[in-house]
Image (spheres, coloured by chain):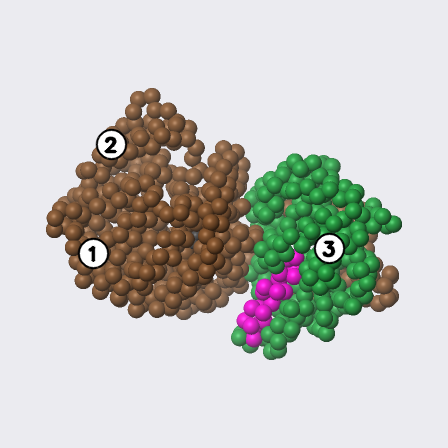
Amino acid sequence: MRAALFVTCVNDALYPRTGIAVVRLLERLGVGVDFPAAQSCCGQPQYNTGYRRESEPLLRRTAAAFAGYPYVVTPSGSCAAMVRAHYPRIARLAEQEGRGSGLVAQAEDLVPRVYELTEFLVDVLGVTDVGAYFPHAVTYHPSCHGLRGLGLGDRPRRLLAAVKGLDLVELPGAEECCGFGGTFAVKNPDVSAAMGTDKIDSAVGTGADVLCGADNSCLAHLGGILHRRGDAMRALHLAEILASTEEEPLR
Amino acid sequence: MTGTFVGMPSFPAFPAFPEAAREAVGDGVLRANLRHATHTIRDKRARAVAELADWDRLRAAGKAVKDHTLRHLDRYLLQLEESVTAAGGTVHWAADADEANRIVTGLVLATGHREVVKVKSMATQEIGLNEALEAAGIAAYETDLAELIVQLGHDRPSHILVPAIHRNRAEIREIFAAEMGRWGRPAPDGLGDDPRELAEAARLHLREKFLRAKVAVSGANFMVAETGTMVVFESEGNGRMCLTLPETLISVVGIEKVVPTFRDLEIFLQTLPRSSTAERMNPYTTMWTGLGPSRGADGDGPSAFHLVLLDNGRTDTLADEVGRQALRCIRCSACLNVCPVYERAGGHAYGSVYPGPIGAILSPQLRGTGSEIDASLPYASTLCGACYEVCPVAIDIPEVLVHLRERVAQGGPVTREGVRVRIRPAHGHTAERAAMRAARLLLDRPAALRAGERLLARARRLRPRRLPGPGRAWTDARDLPELPPEPFRDWWARERGGRA
Ligand code: SF4
């Protein structure tokens, strides 16, 4: 089986470790990985901030870059949700407004082939035990777009629970938003920081060593607060934990 | 009468949401009050909703009834007018707040009385009715406990259902002790802050008003087109007193509150109480149809009933394909109670009687996006989706937020006073628009993107602690992530395939 990796712009530029982890993990599970280099950003920052027209070329680019791949896997719930929940609407409006001939067809063709990483593992590959080893206490923050946008349910937690040596600790108020929200963090800095601080307080309160998530944007926000406060806890993407093995443990 | 609650001005001069929220975020008492109240009610609501196996179907049914009614709103409103008139009521149409205030003020003055008791109503707050009545020399007394607290405290409501949610017991005791005597029966000496004692003080204070007042003003949760029936749901019984004791009853109701048939109420009788107060059924449901057979004639119930149908931006909202779903709202306030932004920012930051997620999509539609506050409201959300999940009529609030952001950022077609116009982007979005455009241009050119990423990687040793410009706010509370030695693309090119 072959799958295309949609690494996303944030991971490409800031969190290559997450992309590398996905490649190692999928290869370990027998999946051949391609990285179509023409890929870029899904257009979510533009769209969610009210610049729908600026997101259209990125939609076109993303759809073209992944044309023909039966599986497009991304380690970002919010980017997967952007494609699934919003691409058809953006394409439809672009066509209505005379800018996007063929865009609807492109968007609709892409939507069913895009999988968030944990969906791909659990639903397509049918695994929950990916043979990982990570001897730490971990608490999991389900990001909103994964939780409510995609309906990931307990997939991420099932994957984590099957990791050897991992002690999964419940995060109180897990389903509450961390306060990142894309440009919200910049436009409403006080509320955003207050939400993030509350989230970090509950996470640190669990006594876990690691705060795990499946969206590096939320983790950048939460990790940034942890770092500023000098807490010992670290924020880590789920893919890195799942990629860690006894032979090749995560540093 | 001086110092009474001053209603909302119709075009607000409130500060933009981020500034207004800053104050609330820094107020520890307020945040604790809000957190406690919203978490308690949201947990209770979740339990009450979980009791119904067919919740999802009820939610879909409520949405369907509302959508159907909105699609044929003209027809159902005319039917309603006919039914109310046939039952002995008088219907008045108000295009905006001023007109509604004029009608109500005129009706009260015509009775010769200068006092009205009020049933808690969002519509009358929306139009600033108390303020208009005061200007005409009419004293309006709020009788809902929380509204009373707000009115006595010279305050603004901060929640749809619990307008005094931002106050704790000690604060309420202070307000009662200091203010009640100025408007009627004073609070008893040595009033404590036990909820029972506080409620009893309010009961005694209000009883005087109920027994004296000859005119009452209310809103309605629903209006039934086929029968002309008005419906008020409440928990305390004060509404029942206002709706039955006075001689004249004036109801101001938004035109979107109509439902076609009596039977449709079956859905909302189940979903509204559970969503709002987490009760299986609200303690008091008062229904009246015009003057009805038993009203007036035998001295039971008012002898005059007036219905003021309020538009005030609703028809314009209805003209918007995406935004119109906001008119399905039954004001249960469930979305406020689950909203993490509302919980930190408090209701006042929304600059409207409609705070929280529903306020963020309703106010900029009813009032337009011309003011600072209205242009900032669509951005007062992380788009986390909790409001949509909880809404008993399935309003996709995040979808409308993004739609309104587009209106603010890029302008576009809107309907204002029935006329289709193109509005320009709101002020202050020029730099952002340029940044979004530049980002898109970069992201749409892989070679340039790669060069940019490499530049970033090379700058990693610099790792600034504070960013300049709009990024500053980010680094006020958070550190930037450590920059990687190379972007993913370069790793891929090196390790896998040598092409990228
Ligand atoms: S938007 Fe939905 S959840 Fe919010 S108050 Fe209205 S009906 Fe209730």
Can I make out residue B14 in this image? no
Q: Which chain is brown?
A: B
Can I make out residue A188 in this image? yes
Residue drawn at (76%, 66%) of the image: A3
Chain for mark 3? A
Q: Which mark is residue B191?
A: none
Q: Which mark is residue A128?
A: 3
Which residue is disc 2 drawn over? B184
Q: Name the spot of residue B209 as percent of width and height, x first.
A: 23, 37
Tag 3 near tag 1, CB within 8 Å: no
What is the three-letter code of the residue carrying label 1? Gly
Residue drawn at (51%, 39%) of the image: B35
Q: Which chain is green?
A: A
> In front: B247, or B282?
B282
| Cα gap from disc 3 to disc 1, whole angstroms | 64 Å
Q: Which mark is residue B290?
A: 1
Chain for mark 2? B
Q: Element at badge 2?
A: loop
Tag 1 near tag 2, CB within 8 Å: no
Foreground disc of the pair 2, 3: 3
Q: Quadrant of residue B435?
A: bottom right
| Cα gap from disc 2 to disc 3, whole angstroms | 68 Å
> Which region shows up in magenta?
A77-95
Foreground disc of the pair 3, 1: 3
What is the three-letter code of the residue carrying label 2? Gly
Q: Quadrant of the C terminus of chain B?
A: bottom right
Chain for mark 1? B
Residue drawn at (21%, 46%) of the image: B244
- Does residue A82 show up magenta in the picture? yes
For disc 3, does the CB lie below 8 Å from ligand 1?
no
